[in-house]
Image (tube, grey):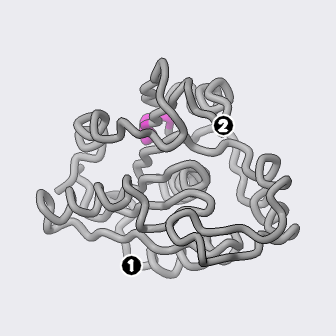
Amino acid sequence: MPSTHLLYLHGFRSSPQSAKAKKMASLVAAGHPAVTWWCPQLPPSPQAAMALLETGLAGWPADTMAVIGSSLGGFYATTLAQRLGCKAVLLNPAVDPARDLARHIGEQTAWHQPEARFFFEARFVDELRALQTGALKRPQNYFAIIAKGDEVLDWREMAARYAGAAVCLLEGGDHALSDFDAHLPRILDFLDLA
């Protein structure tokens, strides 16, 4: 069934201004004007982020919606896809952000707006832990793009987490997926946008 609604979730310290988010927004607007697109600015609190998403997605059809998540957004996308049963595209997804972000407690700068600051609180680590889900319920609903050259996350951990799902394992690459455009045909094919 074609996807009629598409959600994009950015990573830690990122925003809807990320190159990948903007590229997807323009592709959807140009080629799939009937598709509902949403790329919200996620708050630093994982609990608040999930509350925002649950409210915003309340009217969305779970069977024809899809989500794309990058890094921490990939973790959130997996949580949503596990709950809703929708399709998810994961771009170098965080597997254990509670562990990884524990060392980032304190003031942070926004990647696309260095003058904008936010505080990553210790309680956010527990909020991340509470969002962890078990084994993939429907591996066929997931497509993960994983770069072995990711300088932030361990590709082996990502590959193990999404075993059984469709995985594009890149020999090189980087955390930002600088070659994102090269993967768009497979992403769009998987999403099957209306």
Q: Amino acid at mark 1?
A: Gly
**Which dot, 2 or 1, sits closer to the camera?**
2
Magenta stretch holds residue 191: no
Judge left or right: residue 59 versus residue 14. left
Which residue lies at the image location 75% right of the left edge and 60% below the top edge? 128
> Looking at the image, which is closer to me, 144 or 85?
144
Above or below residue 68? Residue 178 is above
- Identity of the residue drawn at 78% across and 66% down: 127
User: CB atoms at circles 2 and 1 under 8 Å apart?
Assistant: no
As measured in the structure, the alpha-carbon distance from the residue carrying label 2 to the one carrying label 1 is 34 Å
Residue 2 image position (x, y, % from top left)? 22, 52
Give the vertical position of 160 relative to 34 (above or below): above
Position of residue 192 measured from the top left corner of the image (x, y, whole percent): 22, 46
What's the magenta region? 139-143
- Counting from the top left corner in percent of width and height, residue 149 is at 55, 26
Which residue is outermost to the front? 115
> Residue 78 appears at what percent x and percent y?
56, 50
Q: Is residue 65 left or right of residue 139?
A: left
Q: Residue at x 36, y 36 (%)?
A: 179
**Amino acid bearing label 2:** Leu
Q: Earlier in the sequence, mark 2 or mark 1?
A: 1
Residue placed under numbered mark 2 in the picture = 153
Name the residue furthest right.
122
Question: Which quadrant of the figure has residue 52?
Answer: bottom right
Name the residue: 49% across, 44% down: 176
- Residue reaching furthest top? 171
Left or right of residue 145, residue 152 in this image: right
